[in-house]
Image: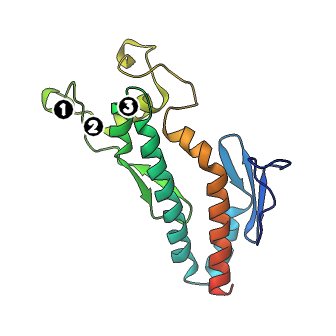
Amino acid sequence: MAFSAFPNMPGDTGGTLGRAGTAAVAGNTVVVKDLFETLKKFSKASKEFNGEMRKVAYTIARSVEAKVKIEAGSVSRASQAIEVAKGLRASNDRIPTIKLRNKESFVSKSRPNSKRKIKVTRGDVFFGAEFGGGVRRTTLQFLRHRGQSGYFFWPTVRKQKNEIAKEYLEGIDRVVKQLGI
């Protein structure tokens, strides 16, 4: 099954089309029309569908996770971003999901947790490392605030959104064909 269009191709409409449904790329999100209904319908048709879709989604999430970690290294004053990115893990779900192990200790070179009364976790630092700070006295350790654009996680996801949608819809088509649904 071929895809009709992607925003990075000339003359496109910003959407994709596969047997599983249609996907539109709008802003920072990829919207697949009736995705959960489609997944539910296919999972009722075959017991193996959910397991196979978890494999497809996990592969995509691992790929994005690796690219996020590379992007974190390119941020100026990257030590916070790199340390936070170490806590990102692809999750085993039917849709590509990346989670942060937010309860793990954040390793700081300048102020290690062994010298603190309250231990700092990756979850405590993620939003400052991703979106910046510097406006308040308590956020001066972060790069300047960038609003919603981010420094390493969301820019990478935005760069990859077309490939994510394409791989995911192709994966659904492949699994449906493989299982004969």
Image spot of residue 16 (x, y percent): 76, 58
Query: The N terminus appears in which quarter of the rendering?
Result: bottom right
- Tell which residue pokes out farthest to the right in this image: 11
Marks 2 and 3, how far apart at CA: 14 Å
Q: Secondary structure at mark 3?
A: loop
> Quarter of the image holding residue 22?
bottom right
Q: Nearer the viewer, residue 166 or 93?
A: 166
Residue for badge 2 = 106
Q: Nearer the viewer, mark 2 or mark 3?
A: 3
Q: Secondary structure at mark 1?
A: helix
In-image side of 40 versus 48 (left or right): right
Marks 1 and 3, how far apart at CA: 19 Å
Which amino acid lies under the numbered mark 3 shown in the image of this protein?
Ala
Image spot of residue 162 (x, y percent): 67, 52
Q: Nearer the viewer, residue 11 or 161?
A: 11
Image spot of residue 50 (x, y percent): 55, 75
Q: Nearer the viewer, mark 1 or mark 3?
A: 3
Could you tell me which residue is drawn at 55 percent across and 82 percent down? 48
Which amino acid lies under the numbered mark 1 shown in the image of this protein?
Asn
Say if 63 sits above or below 128 in the image.
Answer: below
Q: Secondary structure at mark 2?
A: loop
In-image side of 131 versus 83 (left or right): right
Residue for badge 3 = 78
Could you tell me which residue is drawn at 50 percent across and 64 percent down? 59
For marks 1 and 3, the one nearer the N-term is: 3
Marks 1 and 2, how far apart at CA: 8 Å
Query: The C terminus appears in which quarter of the rendering?
Result: bottom right
Q: Nearer the viewer, residue 56 or 79?
A: 79
Query: Is there CB contact under 8 Å for labels 1 and 2?
Result: yes
Could you tell me which residue is drawn at 37 percent across and 26 percent down? 77
Which amino acid lies under the numbered mark 2 shown in the image of this protein?
Phe
Residue for badge 1 = 113
